[in-house]
Amino acid sequence: LKRFRARHPAFETWVSESQTLIEPGIHSGIDIAIRSGNGRWPGVKAERLMDDVLIAVAAPSIKQLLRKPADLARVTLLHDEDPAISWLDFTDRLGLGRPDWATSGPRLASTLLLIQTAVAGDGVALVPARLAEAHLAKGDLTAPLTVKHTHPLTHWLVRPQRALSSPAIRAFTAWLRAEATNKI
């Protein structure tokens, strides 16, 4: 958002986060939305925005405990409330199968809570790489395992069927598309 504001200082953005499905349009007061899923929702236009890659992240103090993938059994795994982000799928990808230990550990309501908890050294989190990149760059987090796992859901730019066409919305959607193409 800082980059958007620098490029378009006259436009004001309001960001709202919700786990419920809100329809963008006149009645909701929402101009556009970003949704994760398959892109098939009635009553809206959905444009593929980006995919995500999931990585395991931990505080530097925990990195030393994770020399090989099987070492995940010896640490606290932090779980996302989102069932699409699954340690079982990740351990399967690592060749460890779907062990019982991959289901234990605290569950947190959002990716930001997962990242904060991992930064605090309370466990290993499985998170979208894009959301962890600033902490990885600062050294607050490490990615001790080289395996990346494709997130099963895609992010979509969602607009009402009758797309609202103000200069602010056009500028913001163009900026979103450009940001989504940035690779880590």
Image: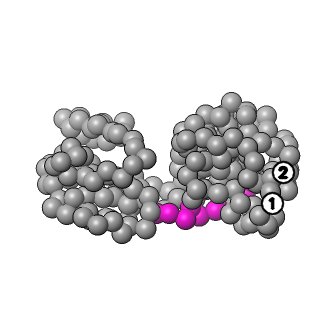
Q: Is mark 2 on a helix, strand or loop?
A: helix
Q: What element carries label 1?
A: loop
Residue nearest the viewer, comparing 111 with 11: 111
Location of residue 73 in the rendering, given as x and y in whole percent from the top left corner? 84, 51
Residue type, label 1: Pro
* In front: label 2 or label 1: 1
Taking the image as shown, residue 158 lies to the left or right of residue 55, namely left
Query: Are discs 2 and 1 less than 8 Å apart at CB?
Result: yes
Is residue 57 in the magenta section?
no
Instruction: Check disc 1: other Cα within 10 Å, few if <14, some if 14-19, many if 20+.
Output: few
Residue named by callout 2 = 73
Location of residue 134 in the rendering, given as x and y in whole percent from the top left corner? 56, 40
Q: Which residues fall within the magenta stretch? A: 145-154
Of all residues, the one furthest to the top in this rendering is 120
Residue named by callout 1 = 99
Quadrant where the N terminus sits is: top left
Residue drawn where x is 59% and y is 64% of the image: 150
